[in-house]
Image (spheres, rainbow, N blue to C red):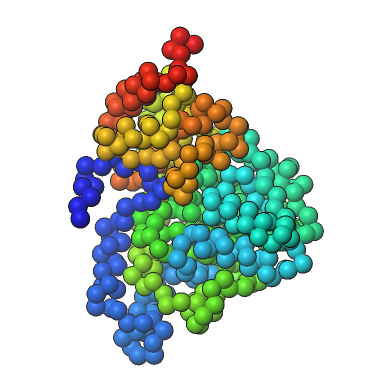
Amino acid sequence: MNCNSDKVIYMDNNATTRIAPEVVDAMMPFLTDCYGNPSSMHTFGGQVGKAIEEARGQIAALLGAEPEEIVFTSCGTESDSTAILSALQTWPEKRHVVTTRVEHPAVKNLCENLAQLTGHKHRITRLKVERDGTLDLEEYRQALTEDTAIVSVMWANNETGVIFPVEEMAAIARERDILFHTDAVQAVGKIPINMKDNAIDFLSLSGHKLHAPKGVGVLYIRKGTPFVPFINGGHQEKGRRGGTENVASIIGLGRACTLAGEKMEEENTRVRALRDKLEKGLLSSIPKSMLNGHPEKRLPNTTNISFEFVEGEAILLHMNEYNICASSGSACTSGSLEPSHVLRAMGVPFTAAHGSIRFSLSIYNTEEEVDFVLDKMPGIIAGLREMSPFWNPDE
């Protein structure tokens, strides 16, 4: 199968990223010659186990954590569920979860199920967001109660890139003896994180968001945090997550984390500059377009722009004709025709929320690609608006 990726202008990196060539090289021996089980007693398997521990150290280094605080999982969703359900099992008398209205479906849908499937035994508080996607910390403080078992707030929003003050929020939770979890899937590798300097108890990350393979993730568990495993089985991960390790992907994730640390400055300078050029160009050349999310408090690679009076799906189909890849929201909700729950929570007008496009760049994007998108997008939007019954060019 040939996907012709060389012809694709890929600006959908918050959905998934290409695997870095250096990561592929690191993985290959563990897909071929180094196939031993890391739990085996013999040297052949023990060498694989040693490589896993080296990868654990690489991931810990990027997070400013200790290696023993890193637990390997299959993905960010598993990590999210594990953290939240662990807290509720640790304190079964506490039945309250605080989260936000703009969480990824991995947290949003879990919380909805907790409330519904347990006969409303669990109570969920979903914090509102402002028009620019930011949170009100006073509302957060008032939401915490004696019954709160855990707070789960994403570090950065996957659709708008807006960064939440999770370190400050975690400190507030600790003062109340409440556990704090953050879904940092979009933040890790894009902005500096140092777990030694904050009070966060659980952190989730996913390999395929930072140029590692799909199917591998991490749950950071702060040393001393009470914990109940989600997957029971063998003694892997010191009894914290059963199941034979996904060795090659773990090795790849370790290498990807090292690369992310090395590329962090580029992410926050060159990639940010490309994002800004794309954003300013679209907003200036296309009337009735608007930025969704805080202009400063967001990830360096992400811009979410609404084009009023057109449908996001139609925009994407026309972009696809030029091999331009972007998204109309979270990839995990791409089958829904409803406007983004994130944009609805932000109060984005209906006529704009339906026509929102998220562009998310990476270190592999170029200025030539940005120029190409800026050349094609005005025509795409103008053509769609001509067919829209809601478009009035004179207004």
Q: Residue at position x 47%, y 69% from top?
A: 72
Dividing the picture into quadrants, the one containing residue 381 is top left
In the image, farthest residue toward the right: 146
As displayed, is residue 300 above or below residue 104? above
The percent coordinates of residue 235 (x first, y second) are 50, 82
Q: Nearer the viewer, residue 208 or 350?
A: 350
The percent coordinates of residue 71 (x first, y second) are 50, 70
As displayed, is residue 178 above or below residue 263? below
* Left or right placement of residue 324 versus residue 228 in this view: left
The percent coordinates of residue 296 (x first, y second) are 52, 35
In the image, farthest residue toward the top: 394
User: Which quadrant does the N terminus fall into?
Assistant: bottom left
Q: Residue at position x 30%, y 67% from top?
A: 27
Q: Residue at position x 36%, y 82% from top?
A: 37
Q: Is residue 157 visible?
A: yes
* Left or right placement of residue 239 versus residue 385 in this view: right
